Amino acid sequence: MTVHPTFLNLIMVVKKMKMGFIFIIIMCLLTPVQRAQIPTVTISDLSFKNIDFAMNLYRQISSSHDKNIFFSPLSISASFGALLMASGGVTYDELLIGLNLEQLQRAEQPELIPKLFQLLHENITQNGSLKLDQGMALFVHRHFGVEKAFEGQIKKFFHANIETVDFSDTKRSIRSINDYIKNKTKNKVTDMISTLDAETQLMLISTIFFQGSWQMPFNPNFTHGASFYIDNYNVVQVPMMVKEDKFFTMEDYPLGARVLKLPYQQGVSMLILLPNKGMDYTVIDEDITAEKFITWLKRLQKMCCTRL
């Protein structure tokens, strides 16, 4: 058994502006790797691949509009990872490629990738003081059969609930699904689904709930209105939190951006990527990879009296 840090994208929040910035909430875990069970692939490999998956997906989403973007790469990859177990042939191969996991697949270990997701989930939820809850549920039409093997696998590896509903009764189905989401998100999301096609046979729902406290809280008394530069020509007034302290930061000179780490309690941090003045955020977006991401984390240094 070896122990090493694992870096995991949980949530990405991208403010789509020409002088935009990117929030990435990451988890740094001391992850035990069971090499007797998984001799060639580790959770770190899964996390590394998930970073590139996250950025590739972000680039696809951002190419269609200039609005703000909020999504959870982990929720999306875990959901499609669960569907891998019910797929085969071309569909299986396309899912692997889409998830950026084809290099982790082992023909002699068909349950390897689901097992990695399982180990990752267990390591996240073992910290009882951290409010982080992943949920997955498969809502299946009452006339739609689910293979027992798949039912056992999705419960074992993804802790997923399988719920039988009558999708032809759309009102009751909507209520059941929204109740599940409301419960999993601690009443934060109450009416996720408003309409439903009566011909629906199956719906996979994935939720992620995170609540963390800053390791070094901001004093709300210092919050004040200030100028936020959308680009070189557009400025808006917004409430700005202010804090002066020692923070981990680094400058990526080739990229033309600065990286700042804001720690939550219990080993979770927010990374803020801020393009330098005059930099086009679309140029920076194209150059962000898992390798560069890990380099940022390695080069972060605590700087004295950084003012936020």
Image (spheres, rainbow, N blue to C red):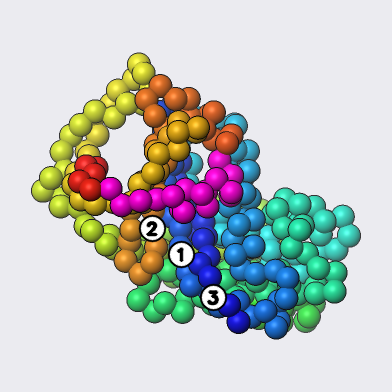
Instruction: Give the CA distance from mark 3 to mark 2.
Output: 20 Å
Q: Quadrant of residue 155?
A: bottom right
Query: Is residue 48 rendered to the left or right of residue 134?
Result: right
Task: Examine the structure image and report whether residue 293 is included in the region drawn in magenta.
Answer: yes
User: x, y (%) of residue 257?
Assistant: 43, 34
SS label for mark 1: strand
Q: Nearer the viewer, residue 58 or 45?
A: 45
Q: Secondary structure at mark 2?
A: strand
Q: CA–CA distance between discs 1 and 2?
A: 8 Å
Neighbour tally class for label 1: few under 14, some 14-19, many 20 plus, Cα within 10 Å: some
Q: Which mark is residue 269?
A: 2
Mark toward the start of the polypeptide (1 vs 2): 1
User: x, y (%) of residue 267?
Assistant: 38, 66
- Give the image location of residue 285, x and y in percent: 54, 35
Q: Identify residue type, mark 1.
A: Cys
Sequence-first tag of 3 and 1: 3
Q: Nearer the viewer, mark 3 or mark 2?
A: 3
Image marks 3 and 2: residues in contact by CB distance under 8 Å:
no
**Which quarter of the image is occupied by the C terminus?**
top left
108 and 131: which is toward the camera: 108
Q: How many marks?
A: 3
Q: Residues within 10 Å of mark 2 (few under 14, many from 20)?
A: many
267 on left or right of 83: left
Region rendered in magenta: 288-303
Which residue is labeled 1 in the image? 28
- The residue furthest top is 233
Amino acid on which disc 3 is placed: Val
According to the picture, the residue beneath numbered tag 3 turns out to be: 3
Q: Earlier in the sequence, mark 3 or mark 2?
A: 3
Kindly identify the residue that appears in the image at 40 percent across and 50 percent down.
300
